[in-house]
Amino acid sequence: MFESLEKVQIDLVERLAGAAKDRKSPMHVPTVVTSDVDARIMVLRAFDSAAWTLRFHTDTRAPKVAAIRRDPRMAVLLYDQRAKVQIRVRGQGRILCGDPIVDAAWAASDNFARRCYLGDGPGTPSDTPTSGLPPEFEGVEPTDAQLVPARANFAVLLVEIEEIDWFYLAHTGHVRARFERDGGAWQGSWVSP
């Protein structure tokens, strides 16, 4: 099925692009790990196959933002159980706030999604179970005017991919390939599973 590194690289691009576009893709919500060895599930918003970046949305007040700014090393784990393909990515994270990429991501979001950035910052303590949203926005879509303060809390996390480990689990024998960025080009090799 995957007899060449070129086919594996094509598979990687197709899976990452599909995961960003298709909410039903099993790779749409990968595990993202920061250098402080904290892991969380995040929605993959975009994959740029020219720049080899993964884009996620985040709150500027989230602890992961400070962790990435201190040490930008990151990892992302994606898995498609049905296809039996695991992709592990390592790279450098960048938090973007006042950037055209952030403006475009904000503009592409609907007001219901944007309301998440109106609430308490991630990790804010509470005496009761809470969404963190102001009560007037529980289950309610805010207006553009009501969302003005939320924009300051919205950021983009870009993960610039430096290494990829692709793993195909097969009952006939697993297959694994590793790719490392060498300048602008990728160098691939087969490795033992």
Image (tube, grey):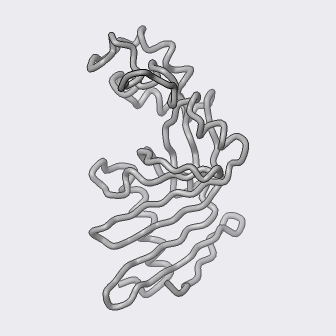
Q: Residue 69: horizontal and vertical position, in percent?
A: 70, 40
**Residue with the most extreme bottom position:** 172
- Looking at the image, is 12 positioned above or below residue 67? below
Image location of residue 64, percent across then percent down: 59, 40
Q: Image point 51% across, 45% down: which residue?
A: 55
Image quarter hosting the N terminus? bottom left
Residue at x-position 55% and y-position 62%: 89
Residue at horizontal 60 percent and vertical 61 percent from the top: 90
Residue 137 vertical position relative to residue 170 in the rendered view, above or below:
above
Q: What is the x, y in percent for residue 115?
A: 39, 21
Q: Nearer the viewer, residue 184 or 121?
A: 121
Left or right of 80 on screen, residue 120: right
Q: Tell me residue 48's x, y (percent).
A: 51, 52
71 relative position to 140: left or right: right
184, above or below 124, in the image: below
At horizontal 39% and vertical 64% (from top left) the residue drawn is: 79
Callout count: 0
The relative height of residue 116 versus residue 172 in the rendered view (above or below) is: above
